[in-house]
Image (tube, coloured by chain):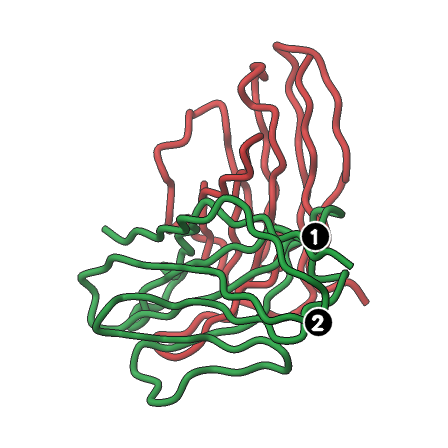
């Protein structure tokens, strides 16, 4: 079975500073994908970044980068130059690849609430 | 254009009632999902449909019955609502794919409150 662990229930950061949100995972599947989603107070789920288990390079999307350490089974999200609008819940999620037909269910971690202070 | 839409956005009802939540996606995706987010923000898959066929049923009480009339729609009907059903229900969709990135796009959520 797959499992995601986010050990930081809450984090805060000063505006314009960088912050790392931790995510470790457990899976026996050789092929998998890792996602980070943002959930602001308005409630919607916003996709941020994706990392495939066979990707050679760490994923980056604008101010977001994923520090993927496969041997340690960690997929930490790094947000550079934090902005007030980054205050939200952040969820790490995993799914197994190599399957089609709707089997790509996401397993989510408990989330980390990030507060950006001015 | 909204990619994944859900109606209603808010639903307040009494215990014991039956209610439905509707979901539609205009992304041409093959697969749709229902997730439940509880009061502690924990998100869990409930169901997945692929081309109108039920693929995943995650030990959800049979008071919950998903229905997919076509691959663009996935509705959730809940019978005999209980207090514990109060949650935010998210619909999501993804393009079916055996490998590679299969990003799931989420609807805005439906906040269900059972009194």
Question: Is residue A61 depicted above or below B88 in this figure?
Answer: below
Residue holding disc 1: A40
The answer to which of A112 and B16 lies nearer the viewer is: A112
**Mark number for residue A29?**
none
Label 1 neighbourhood size at 10 Å, few (<14), some (14-19), many (20+)?
Answer: some
**Colour in which chain B is drawn:** red
Question: Is residue A110 depicted above or below A48 in this figure?
Answer: above
Q: Residue at x 51, y 55 (%)?
A: A91
The answer to which of A53 and A100 lies nearer the viewer is: A53
Q: Residue at x 25, y 57 (%)?
A: A26
Label 2 neighbourhood size at 10 Å, few (<14), some (14-19), many (20+)?
Answer: some
Residue holding disc 2: A16
Question: Is residue B102 depicted above or below B13 in this figure?
Answer: below
Q: Residue at x 41, y 75 (%)?
A: A67
Image x and y of residue B46, in percent: 45, 41
Q: Residue at x 58, y 75 (%)?
A: A64
Image x and y of residue A8, in percent: 46, 49
Answer with left or right where residue A76 lies relative to residue A117. Answer: left
Q: Chain for mark 2? A: A
Where, by quadrant of the figure, is residue B92 drawn?
A: bottom right
Q: Are marks 2 and 1 in contact (CB under 8 Å)?
A: no
Image x and y of residue B23, in percent: 66, 48
Answer with left or right where residue B97 lies relative to residue B27. Answer: left
Reading the chain from its start, which is encountered first: label 2 or label 1?
2
In the picture, one chain is green; tell me its letter: A
Distance, label 2 to label 1, CA atoms, is 19 Å
| Tags 2 and 1 both on a single chain | yes
Where, by quadrant of the figure, is residue B37 drawn?
A: top right
Answer with left or right where residue B56 lies relative to residue A113. Answer: left
Nearest to viewer (mark 2 / mark 1) = 2
Image x and y of residue A80, in percent: 61, 75
Instruction: Check disc 2 and report its element: helix, strand or loop.
Output: loop
């Amino acid at each position: 079975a797959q499992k995601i662990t986010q050990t930081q229930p809450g984090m805060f950061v000063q505006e314009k500073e960088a912050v790392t949100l931790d995510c470790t995972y457990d899976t026996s599947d050789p092929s998998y994908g890792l996602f980070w989603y943002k959930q602001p107070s308005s409630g919607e789920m916003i996709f941020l970044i994706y990392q495939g288990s066979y990707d050679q390079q760490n994923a980056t999307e604008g101010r977001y980068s994923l520090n993927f350490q496969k041997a340690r089974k960690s997929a930490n999200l790094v947000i550079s130059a934090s902005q007030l609008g980054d205050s939200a819940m952040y969820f790490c999620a995993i799914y197994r690849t190599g399957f089609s037909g709707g089997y790509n269910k996401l397993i989510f971690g408990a989330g980390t609430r990030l507060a950006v202070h001015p | 254009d909204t990619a994944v839409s859900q109606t209603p956005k808010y639903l307040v009802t009494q215990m014991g009632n039956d209610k439905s939540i509707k979901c539609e996606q205009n992304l041409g995706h093959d697969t749709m999902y229902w997730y439940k987010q509880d009061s502690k923000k924990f998100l869990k898959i409930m169901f997945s449909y692929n081309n109108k066929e039920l693929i995943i049923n995650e030990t959800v009480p049979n008071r919950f019955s998903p229905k997919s009339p076509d691959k663009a729609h996935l509705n959730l009907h809940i019978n005999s609502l209980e207090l514990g059903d109060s949650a935010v229900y998210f619909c999501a969709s993804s393009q079916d794919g055996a490998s590679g990135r299969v990003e799931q796009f989420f609807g805005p959520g439906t906040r269900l409150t059972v009194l």
